[in-house]
Amino acid sequence: MAIPIDLPVVQPRGKKGGFARRQEDAPESLREKTLELEAKGEWIVQRVPEPAAEVSTRSGGVKRVPLQHTWHHKSCGQCGHIPGYSTAIFWLHRKLGLEYHDPRDQTSCTAWNYYASATSNQAAQAAVAMRNFAAAYETGYYPQIHCATSYGHYKEVRAEMVHHKALRDQVREIMKKLGKPLVMPEEIVHYSEWVYAVRHEIAKRKVLDLSGITVTVHPACHYYKLVQEDAIYDPDVYGGQRTAVVTAVAQALGATVGDYSTWFDCCGFGFRHILVQRDFSRSFAVQRKIEAMRDEVNPDVTLTHDTGCVTTLDKSQFAAQAHEGVKAAIPVLSEAQFAALAMGAHPYRVCQLHWHAADYRPLLEKMGIDWQERWREFEDDVARLKANPGAFMTWEDADGDWAAPLAHPEHVKHGGR
Amino acid sequence: MTSRIEGSTIGRRGGPTTSYEEKERLFEEVRADLRFGDYLYGCYECGICVAVCPSARFYDFNPRRIAQAVAREDVELVWEQMNGEVWECSQCFSCLRCPRKNNPGGIVTIMREVAVKNGLRSAQQALEGYSRIIYKIMSTGTQVSPDMIRPEAFPDWGPTAKQTADNLEVWRRAMPPETMHTTATSWDVDDKTLTELYLIWHLTGVLDMIKTLDESLHMILVDVMEEKLEEAGYPLS
């Protein structure tokens, strides 16, 4: 039996029990170490381009999140089977008038394989990361990483590269053979940090009233548990005791965030398990996450910010319905999809919800979206595409009548705080 | 059935015929890994890692025992774990909540790599059914591609898997990002990018790991990579 906890989602600053880290206890700054290594000629550090938002981190530091001119390090799982996740991230950039580059000179981080099968090693993983960073540097655009596992793993790689000269030397030699420079970004930035930074600009452009929507948030393990110091924490959200990304976005959009006791648990993805041992993933996702959310909050939707979490929480609910007593599903979206819907994105052309397994239609109805009409439009699109084998949907097609006015980057410069 | 470890004849997990010296060699290989020093600092035996571990709830898996076994240099127990429970870890890294700053999940990563690299039969068994996924990531640079979502592979995902498979080609064109109109890869990856990835696998010994794990898979991968690498001036031989 889960025990609900009484931790307010919003806790005022300065409340009794507030915590300030002593200077002498401050954790190592990998950013500073990265810059020191540049000064010694070990590598090039790609600087965060302006305009950038300043956000607060778990260690009490400041992280600069670039708002535009970003190189989108896509996620293999998002693009592969929840493509509305990636599309929504791009769509938000376009609607906010923030330019980006969607590269073909990009591989996956390959960490799904590293964590699942161990058929890789430290040097290979570091070389894959540094190849992608070099590819971004060569374009002049700054990496924004869509997957929390890629983000967490690249932060592991950064720490290992900073700490071990032998590894740096080995990877530098590999980069030489590839004809690429050794480049480390000044900050490693996850897309959910960007959404957090621009949340107030998104809120200004929302076209739906979400005050009747209750959400639960699943924070992604590889976002805030792997190399934890520079994950975003905000004193105004959970009193700074949990990561603020996703929750702060839902609140800015006017939704109610409900708390549940198993928030710290992982989703059950397991890397190897989700592909070849899914009984574990299904049981864990349903018993430890979905049922706890249902019993303690009964949300309209659960939001998260990682590939594996959306996959596991969304896809695991179908089989569980065969069990007696397991009730209706909770729709699962990324906060990027939720924010895009709030700004008027098409649920199928942009958010691609037809790829999701748990029934999202009751949520759309409650948000005031006529999903039946939108689905009819999408089916018309599909019919047109079938009749024209070489054709594909464009961004202009996707917007239809929903185009919102573009914003200038300067408007969101201070969106982080 | 025998293991590929030289001098041993392991019929099953942790078989008694593997010499202590061989088990010790593998333990030393784990300990010699560059990451090891950052993953283990000792153990308070507080059990926080177990309390937050998803795999500990569903399997006979225990991150505290992993940390303790390597800390105590218990060669026999590490051997036993390397042949079994390490494959139950979810790699979520919830265990990084450790107040001693241990990383049991990271130790598991190293132990698994040593198991694969040395061709332990238990690793081959744990990864049965996984070859296609390894092939995909190593040969295309992206992992779960759209064409892998088949109803027979994911029957528990409900009707969505069948709908996706039935409409795959046109649904992929019915999305705006130009890089994503692909079915066999998650996005369109440049040929030059793939050649660079292949070179990384070659230069870092990953292809050798695959050869130890699954010779057939290795042959297929070499076949795929050979031409591109030779064109780029890097013969696999």
Image (cartoon, rainbow, N blue to C red):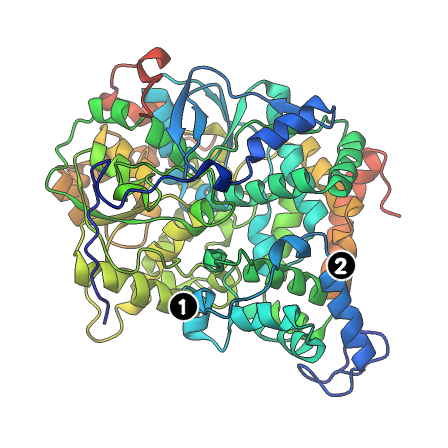
- Name the residue: 43% across, 46% down: A224
Q: Contact, CB < 8 Å: mark 1 with mark 2?
A: no
Front residue of this view, candidates A281 and A393: A281
Q: In this view, does A387 lie above or below B202?
A: above
Residue of label 2: B32
- Name the residue: 75% across, 32% down: A175
- Name the residue: 78% across, 37% down: A169
Q: Which residue sits furthest bottom?
A: B16
As measured in the structure, the alpha-carbon distance from the residue carrying label 1 to the one carrying label 2 is 29 Å
- Check the picture and name the quadrant holding the N terminus of chain A: bottom left
Query: Which of marks 2 and 1 precedes in the sequence?
Result: 2
Percent of width and height locating residue B16: 74, 88
- Name the residue: 69% across, 40% down: A127
Find residue B20 and report its image quarter.
Answer: bottom right
In this picture, residue A294 sits left or right of residue B155: left
Mark 2, secondary structure of its residue: helix
Name the chain letter of the residue that bears numbered label 2.
Answer: B
Name the chain letter of the residue that bears numbered label 1.
Answer: B
Front residue of this view, candidates A3 and B162: A3
Q: Can residue A217 be seen in this view?
A: yes
Residue of label 1: B51
At label 2, which amino acid type do we have? Ala
In this picture, residue A340 sits left or right of residue B16: left
At label 1, which amino acid type do we have? Ala
Q: Is residue B202 above or below residue B234?
A: below
Q: In this view, does A244 lie above or below A316?
A: above
- Check the picture and name the quadrant holding the C terminus of chain A: top left
Q: Is residue B41 above or below residue B77?
A: above
Q: Residues within 10 Å of mark 2 (few under 14, many from 20)?
A: few
Task: Same chain for labels 1 and 2? Say yes or no.
Answer: yes
Tag count: 2
Percent of width and height locating residue A216: 24, 50
